[in-house]
Amino acid sequence: MPPRSKAKPSSPALPPSPDPPAEEFLAFMAVERNASKLTLTNYRHSLRSFRAECPVFTSWMECQADDFRGWLFVLMKRELGRATIRLHFSALRSFYKFLTRRHKLAVYPLLAVQMPKVGRPLPVVLTLAQVEELLALPMTLPKEKQAPEWGAARDAAILETFYSTGLRLHELAGIDVEHVDPYNDTITVRGKGRKERLTLLGAHAAKAVQHYRHAAGVHEGPLFISKLRKRITTQAVGDVLEKYLRKSSIQLRVTPHKLRHSFATHLLNNGADLRSVQELLGHSSLSTTQIYTHVTTDRMKKVYDAAHPRA
């Protein structure tokens, strides 16, 4: 008989009691910081979890560093991933910064609490040959029976736009016709935190978008539409990518975000500077973009090892 796996301790029930400081903080994040619904849900869960698991909790204003160290120990004992633990504490840090500013909290109790370090995996990217194979498929495969006449042109425009701009999935689905400037080949994008930025549309992508719009008669409203002529959903965009991956020779598990990774890596491989790539990706911090330099450095080392006689 195989040995039974050890069950992980379950999270306790969350307290139903009202929490005015936490609710004030969440309202601040929603209104003044434009936090997403997912961020608000995660923050609420983290705050309620801490209250449930801190044995001496009386009020947020009285918590000490040792209380947070104790909760850190509980989370680690539950065998949560380090990244998940850091996300929990990210909510607490933001909350206590808010308390410090709004409620004049004298001591910031999380300052002395050290988090477990997280090793950041390198992003998986497609080769240029794989990208070219993928982008060619919509216009070369036989037309599907149930698809609209302009379906293949739309799919080609979606894939070309993804790779040309490095947009996030929700950013691409949210493009309106008025956001596209066909004279300058640019798109105005509303990214995280509702921040607007300008991204560039390459010649191939611009041509694909123009061909799709003409074929589908898209002159206003959402740029990418479903066969019912409604805005395409993020799920449907993911399905478009998955459909052509199944028909390709690409063995990697590719998501829309991996096309974003490929966009950034290929730019850096061909001489783009890090700051420009940061702007195109919409990263608020340069450190977020620097993950792609590790990919290009790794590739450079492989070329060096293969080519240098004394490597």
Image (tube, grey):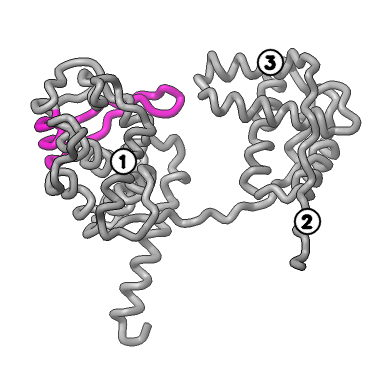
Instruction: Using the image as rendered, state which of residue 241 and residue 145 is in the foreground.
Output: 145
Q: Amino acid at mark 1?
A: Gly
Q: In the image, residue 151 lies at what x, y percent?
A: 18, 33
Mark 3 = which residue? 23
Q: Residue at x 13, y 46 (%)?
A: 142
Query: In the rendered image, which quarter contains the C terminus?
Result: bottom left
Disc 2 versus disc 1: distance between alpha carbons?
Answer: 42 Å
Q: Horizontally, is 216 left or right of 239 in the view?
A: left
Q: Residues within 10 Å of mark 2 (few under 14, many from 20)?
A: few
Q: Which residues are magenta?
A: 186-212
Q: Horizontally, is 238 left or right of 79 in the view?
A: left
The magenta stretch spans residue 253: no
Mark 1 = which residue? 166
Q: Horizontally, is 67 left or right of 146 in the view?
A: right
Instruction: Using the image as rendered, state which of residue 205 and residue 101 is in the foreground.
Output: 205
Rendered position, 186 above or below 268: above
The image quadrant of residue 240 is top left
Name which of mark 2 and mark 1 comes first in the sequence.
Answer: 2
User: Is label 1 in a helix, a strand or a loop?
Assistant: loop
Q: In the image, residue 205 lies at what x, y percent?
A: 17, 39
Mark 2 = which residue? 6
User: Is label 3 in a helix, a strand or a loop?
Assistant: helix
Q: In the image, residue 85 lies at what x, y percent?
A: 68, 43
Q: Residue at x 74, y 36 (%)?
A: 110
Name which of mark 3 and mark 1 comes first in the sequence.
Answer: 3
